[in-house]
Amino acid sequence: MKPDWNAPETVNLEISTDFYQSNKAIGRLFRAINLPPVHPRTTAARRRRQHLHDDTSEADSDLDELFAEFCMVDQQEDPLELAVKHRVAEFIPVEPNSRFVKLAMESLNRYSIELQGICSCNTLQRQKAAILSEEEAVIGTIVAKCSRRGRRKEAIGQLREQTGHLVKYVRDELSLSGDDDSSEYEWLESAWAAWEVSRYLKDRFGAHSYGWIALSEVFDAIKAIEE
């Protein structure tokens, strides 16, 4: 028999005869951990909520609705929003720019679709529609139970590599790295619009992590301008 702390996560220790209760420190620490069960998320339910539009007219309608929301000042009165807004206002106008807002919406849509694909491909759940959470992708871990420790390590490695490539792609988009004629001020406008869009479209899958990427670009653009 092996100690209980060495058992695979999927083994029911209450009925298994292959493991014994270890009284060493590691055994007591192991039994002190009590995590709630993780219920797998599914892509079908999420896709119904995402409303990812490919039609140009619908995209334009979304853009109009977003601009209408931007004009409602009462939605922007939280401390984080105000702090960032006041800092950005030292360098550029903070009113929404249609060009950069549209680019940000397209960028967020692509990021959302790609991130959902990554989270679907790297899940350890056997359900066909299972998907990792955005939080797991951001942190770079998988919380679902797995009987093979090597399988989880391999999946986590793939998850981190794929999300790393995706984040780099988004950062290049927001920094306008492909446009040789762009300035640091346009870089800041692009990043600021992306952060604003991520907050207004916060129900979109990946919007929260997209916002952190955008905010990082805001700080980097400000630093570049100051230098």
Image (cartoon, grey):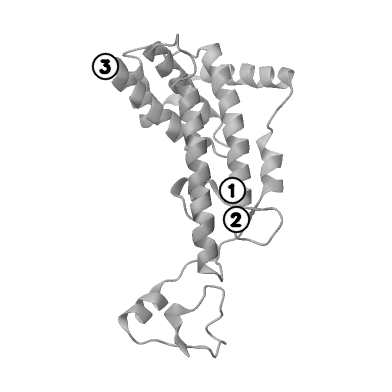
Residue 188: % across, % down: 40, 18
Residue 23: % across, % down: 35, 87
Q: Are marks 2 and 1 in contact (CB under 8 Å)?
A: yes
Q: Which of the labelled discs sits on residue 123, or is there none? A: 2
> Residue at (52%, 49%) from the top-left corner?
159
Q: Amino acid at mark 1?
A: Cys
> Residue at (47%, 26%) from the top-left corner?
172
Element assignment for label 1: helix
Residue 48: % across, % down: 71, 40
Q: Is residue 116 left or right of residue 210?
A: right
Q: CA distance from mark 2 to mark 1?
A: 6 Å
| First in sequence: mark 1 vs mark 3 | 1
Look at the image and tell me whether residue 143 can be seen.
Answer: no
Q: Amino acid at mark 2?
A: Thr
Q: Amino acid at mark 3?
A: Glu
Element assignment for label 3: helix
Classify mark 1: residues with Cα within 10 Å, few (<14), some (14-19) or many (20+): many
> Residue at (50%, 38%) from the top-left corner?
165
Per the image, the residue denoted by label 1 is 119
Classify mark 2: residues with Cα within 10 Å, few (<14), some (14-19) or many (20+): many
Residue 31: % across, % down: 41, 78
Q: Are marks 1 and 3 in contact (CB under 8 Å)?
A: no
Look at the image and tell me whether residue 223 can be seen.
Answer: yes
**Residue found farthest to the left:** 227
Q: Is residue 126 left or right of residue 5?
A: right
Per the image, the residue denoted by label 3 is 226
| First in sequence: mark 3 vs mark 2 | 2
